Image: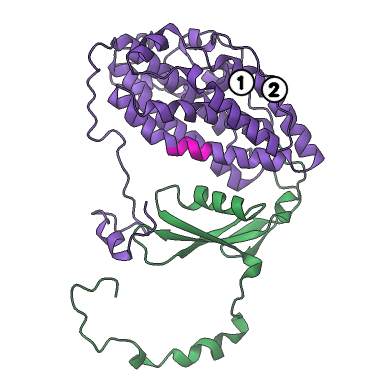
Amino acid sequence: MAHEETVYDALDHAHGGEGQWAFGTGFDDPLAGVDTTVPEGVDPADLGAYCLMLGDDALVLCQRLTEWATRAPELEEEVALANCGLDLLGQARLLLARAGSCGVLGRSRDHATDSIPDEDALAYFRDPDEFVHHHLAEADGGDFAQTMVRLLVASSARLALFARLRDSRDPVVGAIAAKGVPELTYHRDHAARWVLRLGDGTAESHRRAQAGVDAVWPLTADLFTATDVEQRLVEQGVAVDPAATRDEVRDVLTMVLERATLTVPAWPADRPSPGRAGQHTDELAPLLATLQGLAREHPAATW
Amino acid sequence: MTETTAEGGHGAVPTSPDVPSGAHPSPSGAARRDWPLYECFVRGKRGLNHVHVGSLHAPDDEMAVHAARDLFTRRNEGVSIWVVRASDITASSPDEKDPMFAPSGDKVYRHPTFYEIPDNVPHM
């Protein structure tokens, strides 16, 4: 929002029915006016599978971030982590809905009733082997320092991807990416500030931040190798090749760590992401049990 | 039980060192008290001025702006945030209430209520 707007411009922007809010609301629909037709020549199954990958990365990391609710070291930081999680949940919802509209529903409909929307069916009624996020998203968060390191890595990689995806030939993916870029920029900024303060803080905070870096770094091996689906979509101008983001992501992470007086570990060799193929660690099942328990126990519950 | 005290602003904050912090305790239970208190002001989309919205604790000025963004503008309320250390605010004292404010209580002619306000002048 432009800071230079006059106070009377601001008054003109007031929406109807907002009188009860002290500051107004004025929420935007990120998909307003976006053509949802699948672009010509693009296989809907590929597009849906791609949206599922990006959506699952956000959904599962969101769950990890919200685990800090009631446990964060400071109240202010608890809200900050939950806000980051909510941003990711919003991205996941749009992406899973796009996957569903492309007919990519896996076995979720075996369990979910018709009244449950696609994105809920995908989030709550898929089994672990149907999730296609990177291991980076599902890994246990560790302590606060490790959580911030993981958030820094995940947001840096996702931001590099989303910045390029704004030009996707799929207008829905493009609009979701455009919505996500400022969100991810904030996540990366927030995480970087904490990594700087922890790395260049006390001896204990430095030790923990370095331990977090050492624990998270091997997970970056999965981030930069395109799957077959991605390769096809890259050729069609829909997806972004993650390999094209590798240098940028590594540069950002190296810069933050060096300023934080942390040691940058050797970069692991790239490998095809097992998570993208539905192969996960033992940490996913308990995470999904928490995420899905209520919806499976009380399908279509509302409150 | 955790004792609380009003430290300023809206803030009733824990003063006991054993603040419960769950499975990931902060290195020092007293850390929170080491963080200065900030008062936060937000200019809303429709607001004319920055308005005091609350207070928070933060390790430094930059993180205070971040925390204020997360605490006070998450429902799309704001376009600008100010934070200031509560200790940097000079306030009037409750003891001076009468000499400070009572003299203006009967000066009705200081209100512009004797003028017609044109319809196209907002916010009066």
Which residue lies at the image location 37% right of the left edge and 51% below the top edge?
A1
Disc 2 crowd rating (10 Å Cα; few below 14, some 14-19, many 20+) is some
| Relative vertical location of residue B61 with respect to residue A88 in this rendering, above or below | below
Q: Is residue A179 left or right of residue B70?
A: left
Would you name the residue on which mark 2 appears? A215
Amino acid type shown at disc 2: Ala
Figure colour of chain B: green
User: Which one is in front in this view, the residue at disc 2 or the one at disc 1?
Assistant: 2
The three-letter amino acid code for the residue at tag 1 is Ala
The percent position of residue A8, horizontal first and vertical second, equals 28, 65
Q: What chain does badge 2 belong to?
A: A
Residue occupying the point 25% across, 54% down:
A17
Q: A249 or A68, which is in the foreground?
A: A249
Residue matched to label 1: A139
Q: Chain of mark 1?
A: A
**The one of A142 and A45 positioned closer to us in this rendering:** A45
> Which percent across, then down, holds residue A82?
52, 38
Asked whether, in this view, residue B43 is left or right of residue A285, the answer is left
The reply to whether discs 2 and 1 touch (Cβ–Cβ < 8 Å) is yes
Chain A tint as drawn: purple
Q: Could you say which is closer to the camera, residue A209 or residue B57?
A: A209
Quadrant hosting residue A198? top right
Specify the farthest residue to the right: A203
Q: Characterize the local packing of mark 1: few (<14), some (14-19) or many (20 or more) Cα atoms within 10 angstroms.
A: many
* Residue A180 figure quarter: top left
Q: Is residue A70 visible?
A: no
Range of the magenta residues?
Answer: A182-187
* Co-location on one chain, circles 2 and 1: yes
Task: Say what secondary structure mark 1 lies in.
Answer: loop
